[in-house]
Amino acid sequence: LHLALAFPNKDPLLQMTALDALEVLAVENKDYPMTSERAEFLLGNDELHSGLLYLIGSSSENVEFDPINGYAALRLLTEICRVGISSSVVESTKNKFYSLLECFQKALHALEPRGESERLSYIYAVSNLVASCATSTEEMSKSVLQDTTLLHGWLSLLSRSSQPKLKSAILSSLSQVIEPGIWREEEDACTRPSDYISLSLYHAFGEANNQKDPTECLLASAKSPFVEERLGAYNVLRAMASRGCCVRMLLLYKGEDGNSIFVEWLLNQDNEFTNEGRQAKYNIVESLLADGNNIEGLISTKAFREMQLWMKRGPAHTTTVPWDLATE
């Protein structure tokens, strides 16, 4: 580690090998769960942090973003942020991790991604930084919520009008920050941001897109001809439906023209024809009908019964048309 990440370093191949090995350590999955020893190392090793920050151009040495290994270092820092969200470590390690987040936030301001691959890395980096800050200290969450430059760079869909994959990545990453529980297969509890932070990020999404109502922006993406973008919008709507404080806002949403009503869009099964999309809309209904939401008084009796029927019959449920009406 010392030889590979000490700076200045004239051996990019050695750095590349070290970064690949470290990324394996940082990735957590069902077959390779994170251990406390690995978490302590990744979140609290000063030499590791200094070397990675140097490669992305954030250090006291005034160096530029490394053209060879900079994005590999960025991806590793992104994984370290994920580890920080879900791992419990000693106080001294937490403080080192928080210092890393502050430096990482500054470094992302100077980053100018080009091309789809670099933009995807940037989107995941900012979203995981925000998720880490949102579940750390009050001071850090306040700092990242007030960082409009970073939030706009992450959440804006305007410059990606012909890039549905990037739009989907933005929307899905936002849903992961707002409600991480919907992305976890395990039943164990996960660290969630507060209701205030979730609502602030939701409104920041609208601010980043011509200061529109965020629900209006989501429904526009939910009607996109590109399935990737639609699925991304469904993910955010499901995340919002999973937060009790946001349910009322969704169900009572009515666009400026009076026609873009969320409930009508949700129950219209003719606006989604793919199996993935039908499953995603079903997941939204499932979240809305979860215990504790008490939505029956917020929507019409007919709409509520239709949701219950959809929930009972599963994702493939469709509203049938009476035979006499269908043949008129």
Image (cartoon, grey):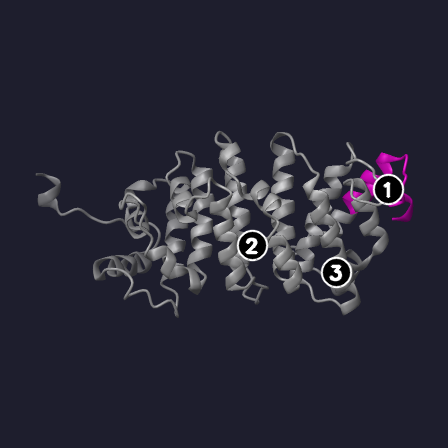
- The residue tagged 1 is 61
Q: Amino acid at mark 3?
A: Ala
Q: Amino acid at mark 2?
A: Val
Q: Does residue 276 show up? A: no
In this view, 264 is above or below 188: above
The picture places residue 126, in percent across and down from the top left corner, at 63, 46
Q: Residue at x 44, y 56 (%)?
A: 240
Q: Residue at x 75, y 43 (%)?
A: 73
Q: Residue 129 lies in magenta, yes or no?
A: no
- The residue tagged 3 is 39
- Mark 1 vs 2, N-terminal side: 1
Q: Residue 20 lies in magenta, yes or no?
A: yes
Task: Please state the extent of the stretch shown in magenta in the rendering.
Answer: 1-21
Callout 3 crowding tier (Cα within 10 Å): few <14, some 14–19, many ≥20? many
Depth check, front residue: 150 or 183: 150
Q: CA distance from mark 1 to mark 3?
A: 28 Å
Depth check, front residue: 4 or 59: 59
Depth check, front residue: 152 or 275: 152
Dot in front, 2 or 3: 2
Q: CA distance from mark 1 to mark 2?
A: 33 Å
The picture places residue 314, in percent across and down from the top left corner, at 34, 55
Q: Amino acid at mark 1?
A: Glu
Callout 2 crowding tier (Cα within 10 Å): few <14, some 14–19, many ≥20? many
- The residue tagged 2 is 177
What numbered label is drawn on residue 228? none
Dot in front, 1 or 2: 1
Mark 1 touches mark 3? (CB < 8 Å) = no
